Amino acid sequence: MGGAGKTTVAKAIYNEIGRHFKRSFLKNIREISKQDNGHVILQKQLIYDITGKEVFKICDIDRGKKIIQDRFPHIKALVVLDDVDSICQLNALCESREWFCPRSVIIITTRDMHLLNVLKADYKYEVREMDESESLELFSWHAFKKKAPFEEFMELSRSVVAYCGGLPLALEVIGSYLCEKTIQQWKAALSKLERIPHKDIQAKLKISFDGLDDYTEKEIFLDICCFFINRDRNYVTQILDGCGLHAENGLQILIDRSLIKVSRNNKLEMHDLLRDMGREIIRDSPPKDPEEYSRLWIHEDVLEVLREHTGTKAIEGISLKFPRTYKECLIDSEAFKAMNKLRLLQLDYVNLKGDYKHLSKKLRWLCWRGFPLKYIPNNFHQKNLVAIDFKCSRLVRVWKEPQLLERLKTINLSHSSYLTQTPEFTKLPNLEKLILKDCPSLMLVHNSIGDLENLLVVNLKGCKCLRLLPRSIYKLKSLKTLILSGCSLIDHLEEDFEQMESLTVLMADNTAITQAPRSLARLQALVHGYVSLCGYEGRAQDVFPSLIQSWMSPTNIFQSHSEAFLQGISSLFFSAVQIGSFHGLSPFLGNLAKLRGMWEECRPQFQFSEKMARLLDALYQTNFMELESTSRTPQISYMEASASSFEGHVQVFIASSADSFNSLFVQMGLCTKVDLLKDKILQGWSYGGWDDSQLPGNQYPNWFIYKGEGCSVIFKVPLVKGCRLKAMLLNVVHSSCMDNTMPDQFLISVLIINHTKATVQHYKGDSITFHEDEQCQSIISNIQPDDLVELVFSIGPQFPVKKIAAYLIFDDSKPRRLLK
């Protein structure tokens, strides 16, 4: 039965062995299969999970089968098919063992053992009820947040566990309900449990519903049971808040009580037993006739009430759904005349004849898939609507005359093939979401969209006839998500983009846009968001560097807007590769004082010019001495120039007699020997620095010491047979004025110059977590034997670096042996 733990067991196995496979967990197959093209949806998800590639052109089940059959035999896959209830579902996903690699594993959960027999499963396992010990532990985790009950609750806990009959779902729900309640409240709940037949699990689960403290929490639960399972949490919150149910707080209470769950994609989920329990509550409320139910969702009941015109004021919600291919269902609008408390209405592919004025003025949610008219009638006065969902409608225009809907927050007209323009927005002042996905005839977005001060989402994906956006759209300071993917005629975005200061998601792939506006760089919120544009897709931090490079052609590199762009992204982790020389970025790097990381590839012969000094000056936020042009010629080698520059840097900081000296350690990479090495170094420390004669060095196997005066040290990486570089430990001596106190946590900056590979890598890190950072560890992996490496170190102008000892620590899996 449901709630016994089938899915939980499957998840445990999946998590335990999954790392050895390409894997896919297809959950809720029974429910998804009921959707239009449900089997195809499952096939697409399976193929994407296993191959990592999306397949859009699966027109029918047979095509999906063919793709699985062709691609899966060579992939070691782990597939979980959760909640299967039909042989058709199995045939669509795993009809033959020959579709899969022999080392693959397929796990199926079902309530029907016969399906496993038909499939000739290798192993069958019937989930057993939990024994008393297991039940008590599971119950305790939910009731007390610990493995075992508190002593004073032990006997009461055993009594509750006995009545749950070993059903995990019941243990979880009732345990969550009793959490943080008093002994008296426990006894009252136990008394109620004792009056319920042992095997009547639904009635036992109802105790949690009855225990909800507020009427609104119960209403939210019942609304979700009938209308909002698998709907977006934010969307449902918006609608139910419009009903005055304080949904944010109520939903959280239901989650805490384990009555509902929220999936990883923010959809509301509910166990079948809990859903059935909620619906039974509605049916059991006297009188028993459907017209007296508060909510109607059973197809036959809804048709009976509407066709017989027996609806009453008791009805608050109706759901009547027909498939898209169904012959038209015609309902007289007068059937709604008496339902003056109706607030939730869902009609899929239903035609309403008559006057729309009969619809309740208390409607908050109108979900009418396949709306049959070209225009919403003028007598459709619904000033209290919060959400309109007219997907797949026949609308050409939304209204002939704009209607004032002050409470409306969401309009979804997706897949409306005939829609040519958006509504006028002047009378929709609180609109937050405009979703017009896949409207292939849409040509005009009304200019008044720029007046929507609360708009958060605009989705125009797949609007293939849309050529341009109104200039006013860039005034949307509140907008967080803009989706233009598949708008193939849109060929540019205006520089006005910088006004969208809240934007965090921009998706404009598969458009005619070839050049992104450089003002994107000034959108600080977008820096931490997601971008899909001009062939680049991913986190903005990863995408922006490539966009920058695409702009840095010889014709535009010195344009002021490029410099403004680089200033705007100075807080990014920046990664750039230049094939020719360093000059592509150097005009601007002096402005990047907040740059966290940088990688630059350049010619070995490039000159350490004044621009390179500007780079160092920006990275370390110190005052490097200017290089005199007369002191070097164009023939000076890179190594000579860099050494001269570093000498100049040191000369800026001359310790006075009042200065004191301190030592600190910086660790790159991980090695168990580092702490021992630190202790040895500290033994040689004295006021004014370490005693070089006491520094641990070549006398220790696989430790190599290189010393440098000032802020830099240069060395050639040795080759150690059978060993690899595991970590670097830098012992840095710095001076500080007597009134400068070194903080417990401070910023460390290191420049790693690989003269052999002609690369410059920069990294800033926290003093405490420096060695744990993934980027820092990558520095170690990029240093190879025979590389000539220079390290330049800074902790800011208040604490000038005086000398450095760099230790290279190799693993000691084999005896040390140097190869010359």
Image (cartoon, helix red, strand yellow):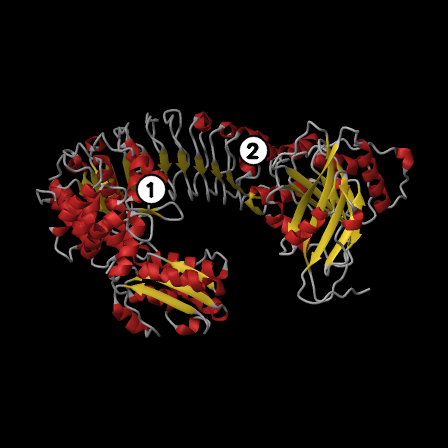
Residue 735 coordinates in the image, percent (x, y): 74, 34
First of labels 2, 1 by sequence position: 1
Q: Indicate the amino acid at tag 1.
A: Ser
**Which quadrant is home to the N terminus?**
bottom left
Disc 2 or disc 1, which is closer to the eye? 2
Above or below, comparing residue 237 to residue 145 in the picture: above
Q: Give left or right: position of 302 versus 245.
A: left
Asked if one can make out residue 302 in the rendered structure from this viewpoint, the answer is no
Above or below, comparing residue 422 to residue 540 in the picture: above
Residue visible at 42% across and 69% down in the picture: 105
Residue 403 coordinates in the image, percent (x, y): 32, 26
Q: Give left or right: position of 234 versus 450.
A: left
Question: On the image, which quarter does residue 416 sit in?
Answer: top left
Question: On the image, which quarter does residue 724 sit in?
Answer: bottom right
- Mark 2 neighbour class, 10 Å CA radius: few under 14, some 14 to 19, many 20 or more: some
In the rendered image, which residue does mark 1 sit on?
Answer: 393
Residue 330 coordinates in the image, percent (x, y): 20, 44
- Mark 1 neighbour class, 10 Å CA radius: few under 14, some 14 to 19, many 20 or more: many
In the rendered image, which residue does mark 2 sit on?
Answer: 524
Q: Indicate the amino acid at tag 2.
A: Gln
**Which quadrant is home to the C terminus?**
bottom right
Q: Give left or right: position of 630 versus 170.
A: right
Between 298 and 349, which is closer to the camera in this rendering?
298
Residue 614 coordinates in the image, percent (x, y): 76, 34
**Residue sitting farthest toward the left:** 287
Residue visible at 21% across and 30% down in the picture: 357
- The alpha-carbon separation of the residues under discs 2 and 1 comes to 38 Å
Q: Secondary structure at mark 1?
A: loop
Between 619 and 298, which is closer to the camera in this rendering?
619
Question: On the image, which quarter does residue 725 sit in?
Answer: bottom right
Asked if one can make out residue 801 in the rendered structure from this viewpoint, the answer is yes
Q: Secondary structure at mark 2?
A: helix
